[in-house]
Image (cartoon, helix red, strand yellow):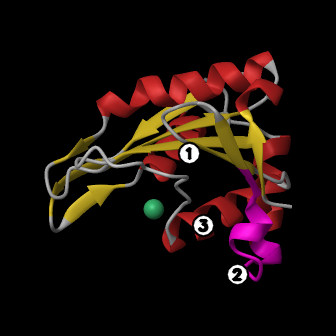
Amino acid sequence: MSHLTDFDSLTPEQQACARLVLETLPHGINVVTGTVIAAVARTDTAFHRGATLWLSGTSGVHAEPAAISAATTAGDPAIHSLYLAMRRTDGGDPGYVTPCGECRQLVADLATYTGRPITIYSLNDRLDHVQVIEHTELLPHAYGSQRLRRAGAARLANPVSA
Ligand SMILES: [Zn+2]
């Protein structure tokens, strides 16, 4: 269940991912509204970073798909955790950011594809508390298909070699 937890209760590895997502925030670019989000996608073997890239009103990439794409591009799609943080241009409290609807569907699709649930850790910039949400809570009735599940199982059984 979704809950707030103390930062100090996270494992050292989770704390390192949390710090990394805050370190990634300055890499975000948003010329349109200024607000940026950073994401760190964690797998068993690596982490993959992404940040907002929004250059005009007609093109943009959210942090979550950027991080997920970095993971899949590296041949490492089995994400089990996604860390998120936001920085507002007005300096206001960013609160705990959650993925937009399209990104929620992407996370749900990836979990179906890999057969692995994804936990979202949403951070504020004080690193005092962390909101923890399972992907199924973000999109409880997500579109899914057996074809997607089979495609993921086939790919994971025969990963692309470098
Ligand atoms: Zn999004």
Range covered by the magenta-colored residues: 132-147
Is 134 included in the stretch rendered in magenta? yes
Q: What's the amino acid at mark 3?
A: Arg
Q: What's the amino acid at mark 2?
A: Tyr
Q: In the image, 73: left or right of 3?
A: left
Residue at (70, 74) in percent of width and height: 139
Q: In the image, 94: left or right of 142?
A: left
Residue at (63, 32) in percent of width and height: 128
Mark 1 or 3, nearer chain start:
1
Label 1 Cα crowd, 10 Å radius (few <14 / some 14-19 / many 20+): many
Is 8 included in the stretch rendered in magenta? no
Q: Is residue 142 above or below residue 124?
A: below
Q: Judging from the image, what secondary structure is the residue with disc 3 in?
A: helix
Q: Is residue 146 above or below residue 135?
A: below
Q: What's the amino acid at mark 1?
A: Ile
Q: Specify the quadrant of the image occupied by residue 2.
A: bottom right
Q: How far apart in space, not on screen, are marks 2 and 3 (Cα)?
A: 11 Å
Read off the residue under disc 1. 68
Is residue 11 visible in the rendered image? The answer is yes
